[in-house]
Image: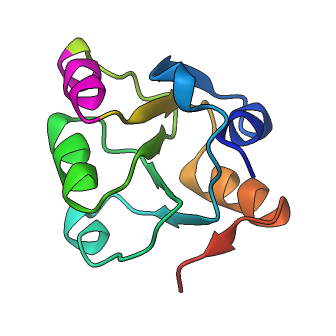
Amino acid sequence: MTIKEITRIIDGKVICCEEKLPNNIEYAFSSDLMSDVLTIEKENLVLITGLANLQTIRTSEMSDISCIIFARDKKIGEDMVSLAKENNMILIESPYSMFHISGELYKAGIKSIY
């Protein structure tokens, strides 16, 4: 499924790196614990989180995650956008909870990690 389709399903707002919207995503992982994110070794993965800070971007970069969805209407700061652009990551804000986003993406065919 493309990131553009995912964005539509979750009523998302793309904050940076719109050029990546045609890229495909196969898996999703939901977590606010960045130590758990570091254990993931999958490609074509989207991270769903409510943790809106620089550590999320840094952890995602270390885990080769290039798409992050911020749940619960969390707002992404300019410092996060700047770091995401440096790492070519697409950032998306969604008004829904992590549970809701996960359910909608699972229903649409995105695979879970575990």
Point out residue 109 in the picture as x, y percentages from the top left corner. 81, 66
The figure's colour scheme reads rainbow
Q: How many marks?
A: 0
Based on the displayed image, in which of its 4 quarters is residue 78 positioned?
Answer: top left
* Pick the front one: 55 or 90: 90
* Pick the front one: 61 or 92: 61
63 vs 12: above or below: below
Q: Is residue 8 left or right of residue 99?
A: right
25 vs 10: above or below: below
* Pick the front one: 62 or 102: 62
Point out residue 46 in the picture as x, y percentages from the top left corner. 51, 54
Please, which residue is most extreme toward the top here? 78
Give the prevailing secondary structure in the magenta stretch: helix
- Highlighted range, magenta: 79-87
Q: Please name the residue shown 71% across and 65% down the image.
A: 110
17 vs 99: above or below: above
Q: Please name the residue shown 47% across and 67% down the image.
A: 43
Please, which residue is most extreme toward the right here? 108
Point out residue 29 in the picture as x, y percentages from the top left corner. 49, 66
Residue 91 belongs to the span the image colors magenta: no
Point out residue 63 in the picture as x, y percentages from the top left corner. 27, 62
Q: Please name the residue shown 61% across and 75% down the image.
A: 112
Q: Is residue 97 left or right of residue 43?
A: right
Q: Please name the residue shown 84% across and 64% down the image.
A: 107
Please, which residue is most extreme toward the bottom here? 114
